[in-house]
Amino acid sequence: MSSVAANSLDPASAVLLEVRGVAKRFGTREVLRNISLTIAEGEFLTLLGESGSGKTTLLRLVAGFEEPTAGEIWMSGVRLDLLPPYQRRVNTVFQNYALFPHLSVRENVAYGLRVKKTAATEIDGRVDEALRMVKMQEFAASRPSKLSGGQQQRVALARALVNRPLLLLLDEPLSALDANLRKQMQSELKALQREMGITFLFVTHDQEEAMALSDRIALVRDGALEQVATAREIYAHPATAYTARFIGQTNLLRGEILDGMARCGAIEWPSDDPGGAAIFSLRPEAIRLASDAVALPGTARFRAALQQQFFSGASELLEVNCSGQLLRVRISARGPLSGEHEFVFSTADAVRVQE
Amino acid sequence: MSGHCRNRRGPLLLVYAALVFVFIYLPVIVLILYSFNRDGVGGFPPRHLTLAWYRQLFADAPLWDAVANSLKVAAGSVTLSLTLGLLAALALDRASFPGKALFRRLVLLPLILPGIITGLSLLMFFVFVGAQLSLFTVFLGHGTALISVATTELFAGLQKMDRAQEEASLDLGATPWQTFWRVTVPNLKLSLIAAGLLIFTLSMDEIAVTFFLTGRDNTLPLEIWGRLRRGITPEINAVSALILAVSVALIVIWYRVRTRGLGADARELLERP
């Protein structure tokens, strides 16, 4: 599993798509600012961001439904942004599927091949194959309106994949599905991507979905890229406070570094970072209940009073108060707690982030 | 309290409504009734029922010429106004250009313009360009005056349409031209049928514009009008009854297509490419 992710991140693997300094303005509204991004062949890259962050606009620029105000988009040595959508070897799975209501499932899937005047026998074979891939053969004759959301989703996937695009764009494809179906489609999507080796550019506002599916995540904030990295990297080393908060839960410790010591309220530890005001991101699961009396090197300790305890099966979340500073701590389940406790964390887990 | 009032007002309102309907529909019923009356338009109540007037009607060659003329004009008008109306609706829905608001009003103006104004101005135009008045000028008159009807219907259809479908089509490699024929037009099929039926009916019934623009060939309404001046015969009643039946049928179909009130099977049939 991890080898797939590692392969696609290998700097030697070929770049499929390159976005160079792209900006997009609608009237006076700047939706995207100076976006530069590369996607490797076979990679699963997710554009993650809040609604209105510009992630869908970036997708539409790659698909060709919008023209960039500035910058260029290249794919396999071809200047993509100068081509109309129908000449790009890119296909899209739309948020609301956008299936053709007047055509059957089979005709929907065959559409791309038919308009390109593919031979009828080849169309039949490839449509069958695509329908089999998404397990929709038995619905070939149905109208899209007769299908459930999940089934329409599969048809939309087959309709795009049957054209063998170099790059598949997915615009929040799972957001209309209920939670269970979404989990199932996530794993099918991931399997499909591995099996076919097609590059996926996926848009979502759901950080869990992004982490579960992607080789790399590009976090979009207010029309600019906040951070682009693997899910693990972005989780372990968020570059900014925004990223740390957006991806997973975190404690943001605000304080300063002075004379080789980081001080955030009552918590302090040695740090050889440059001095000055500082923000640290400390994940709740990086904090433990201290079990021994001696402080080990490379760790920091603090006493805090328990305020709330939320049991969630295998683990529980504590909300503790350390001299007026609220922190969240995730520990493995261990029964009801109360009063003051000693907590410990490895100082390496306190990641200094930008505002 | 209010229930009491309603009880007292109820019967009066009912009588009033009934009288209005009698006023509107009684003449029509009488007209149909007399088309079966052996003794012509005089004498009430009709004593001997007969189909003789219908037999006479079916043997009346000049009348059928008029029907054929009307059908030709109506078919042409449907084609012309749907084509130009679709283009206008597309422009209103998609394009943004200076003077768009004015363009919209100008396109829709014939809807409220009295037919006599449309007819007279078109007549002056044809005289000015030296065109010979004929069925062709009638067709041009109907076809252009009814563009407004086509535009209204088709614009409503375009507004209801999911634009993502057209993007999906382009995305799948279809050119804008292919997308228009394979996605946009099939999506508008119901609006096209509804507009076509309505325009057909309006053109068949049209008198004012036709009166100004026709040459030697009469359309059916003008033929009837001409005969009335020579005296009314139940044959006219018979032809009126038939026109009424066809018009009502067309309007019912139009209304049901428009409201998508058809059964699922019939709708499937209509939507099938």
Image (cartoon, coloured by chain):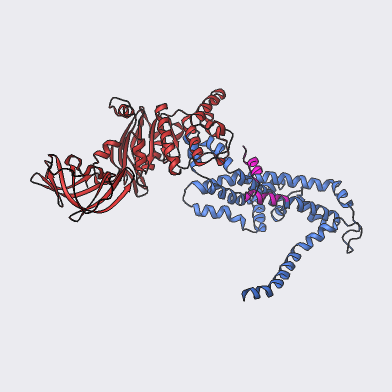
**Residue depicted at x 71% and y 69%:** B14
Residue A18 place in picture, x, y as percent = 33, 32
Q: Quadrant of the N terminus of chain B?
A: bottom right
Find out whether residue B264 is within the magenta segment. yes
Left or right: B209 with respect to B109?
right
Residue A65 place in picture, x, y as percent = 43, 39
Left or right: A65 with respect to B86?
left
What stretch of residues is rendered in magenta?
B249-273
User: B185 or B94, which is in the foreground?
Assistant: B185
Main SS of residues in magenta = helix
Q: Is residue B131 visible?
A: no
Q: Which chain is blue?
A: B
Residue B229 place in picture, x, y as percent = 82, 58
User: B243 or A90, which is in the foreground?
Assistant: A90
Residue B176 place in picture, x, y as percent = 50, 36
User: A280 or B191, which is in the foreground?
Assistant: A280
Left or right: A346 with respect to A50?
left
Q: Which chain is red?
A: A
